[in-house]
């Protein structure tokens, strides 16, 4: 049976893209095996791009963004997912060209659904969301490459952002000395509270003509791409690794092969969208257990649909910090 629900919907109006609350019906949702009543979502940079009309993210409008969603299964035609089950959905096409978590209902393939880890609720899951999942995957790749605290400091670029802040707390909790790199000087104390041993400005990664610089970081997590990533590679110690997951500073990477052939630096690409479901389950279960980031959970901010427009525009301006959770009950 179809039902009406509320969603934050983006429409094209005279060449501009405008988001507002609309009343929709579940009968108009795309085909899929699982209908989910969404209680919470996360805010991500990709959501901000979708809301701005970026056709590289979302091709057709009107559209409901929200690449993350957590809630309860209402209907399911899949043997693997039962009605009443709490689930998490992140990545794949959700919120891009499939109506996403900024609506109170979504309909998706069963293969997109992760069972809620024991001890978690929808809000906790969405404090982490795709950003937390990505941070976890970045750290996991470093660990698989042999990263260890005794090797030296680990840098995190874009440390004030949604991915970077989780990476800071997670790495600190694992015993690493974390150097948080952020362009937001007023967030330095917040980053230290998350466990950063040192906080430096983005001028640490300002463009230099030299192909190599003094090696100061044993390993790193890069969330911004572009020139900062190129400069970070020049400063990684021999044999060190950099997990790369973002592009807010641009998708281009202008560098030389010298960090790779003279210092054996490893550049590790991290995808959180199309990876196997089992890989997502593994990271979610770690965050619900030994990787729990209690400070991130305690500092998360909840908003309602009416506050989405301002919050998403702050992402595009580089003014967003920490974790923001959309609560559909607000």
Image: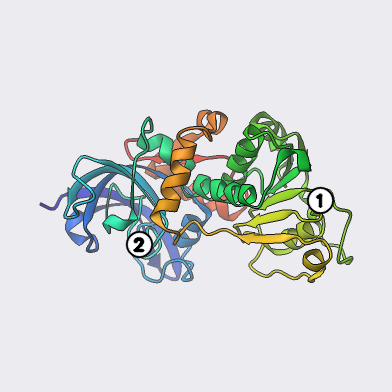
Q: Provide the secondary structure element on which disc 1 rests.
A: helix
Label 1 Cα crowd, 10 Å radius (few <14 / some 14-19 / many 20+):
some
Q: Residue at x 38, y 44 (%)?
A: 305
**Residue at image mark 1:** 204
Q: Residue at x 40, y 71 (%)?
A: 59
Residue 247 in picture, x, y percent from top left:
62, 61
Q: Alpha carbon of mark 2 to alpha carbon of mark 1: how far?
A: 39 Å
The answer to whether residue 43 is seen in the rendering is yes
Which quadrant of the structure image shows residue 226? bottom right
Label 2 Cα crowd, 10 Å radius (few <14 / some 14-19 / many 20+):
many
Q: Which mark is residue 39?
A: none
Q: Is residue 149 left or right of residue 203?
A: left
Q: Is residue 112 left or right of residue 18?
A: left
Q: Residue at x 63, y 35 (%)?
A: 174
Q: Provide the secondary structure element on which disc 2 rests.
A: loop
Q: Is residue 19 left or right of residue 44?
A: left
**Residue at image mark 2:** 63
* First in residue order: circle 2 vs circle 1: 2
């Amino acid at each position: 049976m179809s039902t009406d629900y509320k969603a934050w919907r983006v429409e094209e109006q005279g060449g501009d893209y405008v988001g507002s609350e609309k009343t929709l019906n579940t009968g108009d949702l795309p085909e899929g095996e699982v209908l989910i009543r969404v209680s919470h979502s996360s805010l991500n940079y990709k959501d901000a791009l979708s809301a701005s009309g970026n056709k590289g993210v979302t091709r057709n409008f009107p559209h409901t963004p929200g690449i993350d969603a957590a809630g309860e299964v209402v209907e399911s035609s899949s043997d693997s997912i039962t009605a009443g089950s709490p689930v998490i959905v992140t990545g794949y096409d959700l919120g891009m060209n499939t109506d996403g978590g900024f609506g109170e209902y979504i309909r998706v393939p069963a293969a997109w659904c992760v069972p809620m880890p024991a001890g978690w609720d929808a809000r906790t899951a969405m404090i982490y969301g795709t950003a937390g999942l990505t941070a976890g995957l970045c750290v996991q790749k470093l660990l698989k490459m042999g990263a260890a605290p005794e090797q030296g400091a680990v840098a995190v670029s874009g440390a004030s952002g949604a991915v970077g802040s989780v990476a800071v707390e997670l790495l600190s909790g694992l015993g690493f000395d974390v150097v948080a790199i952020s362009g937001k000087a007023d967030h330095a104390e917040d980053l230290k509270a998350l466990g950063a041993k040192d906080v430096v400005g983005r001028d640490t990664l300002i463009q230099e003509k030299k192909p190599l610089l003094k090696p100061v970081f044993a390993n790193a997590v890069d969330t911004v791409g572009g020139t900062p990533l190129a400069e970070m590679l020049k400063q990684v110690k021999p044999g060190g690794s950099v997990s790369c997951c973002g592009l807010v500073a641009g998708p281009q990477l202008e560098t030389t092969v010298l960090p790779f052939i003279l210092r054996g630096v490893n550049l590790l690409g991290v995808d959180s969208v199309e990876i196997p479901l089992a890989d997502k389950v593994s990271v979610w279960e770690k965050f619900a257990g030994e990787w729990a980031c209690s400070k991130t959970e305690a500092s998360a901010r909840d908003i309602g649909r009416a506050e989405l427009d301002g919050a998403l525009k702050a992402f595009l301006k580089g003014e967003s910090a920490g974790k923001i959770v959309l609560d559909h009950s607000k």
